[in-house]
Amino acid sequence: MRQLEIALIGAGLIARMHLEAWIGAGASVRVHSLDGRAAELAAEFGAKAVDSLAEALDGADAVDICSPTGTHRDIALAAIAKNVAVVCEKPLAADVTEAEEIVGAAERAGVPVYPAHDIRFAPAFARLHELVAEGRLGAGTVARFTVAGYHPRPWTGHASVESGGILTDQMLHGVDIAYWLFGDVVRVHAHYQGEIAAPAPQGTAAVGTAVLTHASGALSQVVSRWTPTPQPPIRVTYHVSGTGGTIVHDSEWPQEIQVSGGPAGTFGYYGESPFSSEIREFAQALRGGPEPRLVSHDALAAVRITQAAARSAWTGRAVELPVKGAAA
Amino acid sequence: MKVAVLSFAHERAATYAQLLHDMPDVELLVADPDGAAEDPARGSATARRLGARYVGSWDELFALRPDAVVVTSEVDRRRELVERAAGAGAQVLCEHPPAVDEADARAMVRACEDAGVRLSFASPACFGPAFAAVRKEITEGEVLGGLTAVHGAYNRPRPAGAEAARSGALGTNAPPVFDMVDAVLGGIPAEQVYAQSNSVLGAEPGVESAALVTVRYADGTVVSVDCSWGPADSGPAVGGPALTFIGERASVEFTAAPRLLGGFDAATSRERWGTRGDDPYAVMLGEFVAAVRQGSGAGPDGAAALRTLRIIQAARASARTGQPVELAVPVTVQP
Ligand SMILES: NC(=O)c1ccc[n+]([C@@H]2O[C@H](COP(=O)([O-])OP(=O)(O)OC[C@H]3O[C@@H](n4cnc5c(N)ncnc54)[C@H](O)[C@@H]3O)[C@@H](O)[C@H]2O)c1
């Protein structure tokens, strides 16, 4: 089988994880970034660095966009124009208009868009979805999702409070899972608190609290937090209820390895990295395999919901979302 | 000290009677003159079983001048009983809600104020030393910093009886949670209430079995809680509210029914799950009786119950319209 050619854009935090996963999936990767770190990153994984986006896209099967969110649209459109498939870090774009542009252009060109919502590949969430899809939860009633984490660097870029700022970024995880489990969302209400505009210094604290009403009648609560200190480490929980019972998870539950004392996060084992399973699934799809568990429309739906949450937090009103195919 | 349980309409009346009866210095009086059509002797039978005094009419009961009463009647009889208790100078512990109507609830609060009687509400999670420690910590703000947001859940299963169908999950599960928040916030009033509900779990159409309520308070604190009924046989893990208090610096999780023991129980073929076992109702009644003796108050007072009632009524309105309800903040309590 011919080796996949991947144009990886960005050489930062997330690009490194993707690169490792692409190499693991047997792809050949050219890396392009603007900060001069592409060469070093590429060398580490036996990939190559290129100097321009055009060079990266030339002859590539797919672009993998791991640059800051504000750059996603232009890079995606450039790739689509060259019939190069798009893998893109979350969120697909900074706002709904940009996300619609990407999805629209990709559809017209017949180019696939695979959004990298890695949370769908994290074992606790992948298993949750399996159970729900198998009907083990019965009809969904209420779900609660919390994510609390520290952002290791200052927030660069510009994002207003009105846009949802740095919260829409993290809230997308919980929102995406809620949408994956319970389907279309018709109403959103949210509060955003704390220092949410970017640029923002390291250690910025913020809380987002959103309630989603799904077309099925099920309800989801998403609490999304940036914590001011690196300790405790990222914490993720869910509590999902249905007529068939409940499914709960807390990332603080001990897994195979638990370390006490000493610096936190020194070592542990949490199963295969979600990035590896994610990229493997995308690679299979790019080689003509089955469609991955999420495609362009899922990314667009998630951006629509987080933008509705931002709008609700800004206006103090609940925001109604139109549902495709529903009578007006 | 004479403590009377007034009516056995509420599911917990018999529990209260038993717990009061077990207190060494309490003389228990039981009155249930209005009875129930299907079980007219429920009150007198309980009294007989406990060897407590059964009183056959309200007049007779209040003539005995109880020091305190526990009001466990039907909701629409609570105003009358609380007013009579106030008239008789008895301290009151009343079940939620005080009344269906805010006007009735206000009248009850006024009657107790006028009579110099402390009106308390039966929100077990607000009593007890662990919750007191959380309140103290948040008030002092040393660990948490300023309180920003609260999220959590109270997923007690649907209580038996017709009253639960009338009140829905919002009526049964929201009051204890919002009483706790009220205690932590020191009575700061709610400013905006948003709620969504569904009846997917319940067998009863139109009765909400699930509800999410989000409240923004006048000081900016945002509280979002799941007040849904849990599955019928969901065990002790859902026995009490669990809330996470998020501050500017740190957060605190409070669990009213924490796990103490695990293991496997071969008799039921189920996982063993044990809490420390301080019965929250015993703790509540103990603190109530102690407060009566000292002439002080314990737990949420009438004003707190009114604030909680307003939140729940606004939540019902919001769930109907799909939009948040703005509440007028009383001028006197604005920060
Ligand atoms: N899935 C997750 O949990 C998760 C976590 C962190 C970040 N992300 C997403 O990943 C993306 C990147 O985040 P990061 O934290 O890795 O950022 P980063 O700042 O660490 O790295 C960004 C990289 O992109 C490069 N870059 C910037 N503009 C470019 C352009 N126009 N062309 C080519 N390269 C360019 C920079 O030079 C840098 O190498 C964002 O969209 C973010 O939302 C997702």
Image (tube, rainbow, N blue to C red):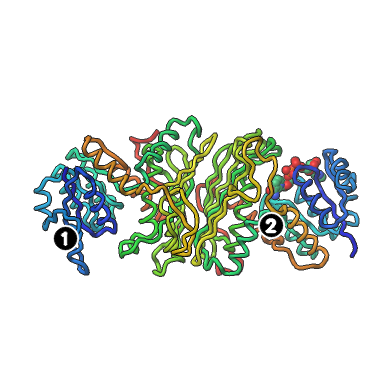
**Residue identified by numbered label 2:** A121
Task: Look at 77% across and 48% down and name the residue there.
Answer: A17
Disc 1 is attached to a residue of which chain? B
Query: Tag 2: residue type?
Result: Phe
In terms of image quarters, where does ligand 1 lie? top right
Whole-percent x, y for residue B170 in the image: 39, 56
Image position of B227 (left or right of A42): left
**Residue identified by numbered label 1:** B44
Label 2 element class: helix
Task: Look at 68% across and 37% down and name the residue there.
Answer: A152
Query: Tag 1: residue type?
Result: Ser
Which quadrant is the N terminus of chain B positioned in?
Answer: top left
Disc 2 is attached to a residue of which chain? A
Task: Look at 60% across and 53% down and name the residue there.
Answer: A174
Along the line of sight, which residue is nearer the eye, B304 or B20? Answer: B20
Residue B153 visible from this viewpoint: yes
Label 1 element class: helix
- Disc 2 crowd rating (10 Å Cα; few below 14, some 14-19, many 20+) is many
Decide: is A102 above or below B65.
below
Image position of A191 (left or right of B315): right
Along the line of sight, which residue is nearer the eye, B269 or B252? Answer: B269
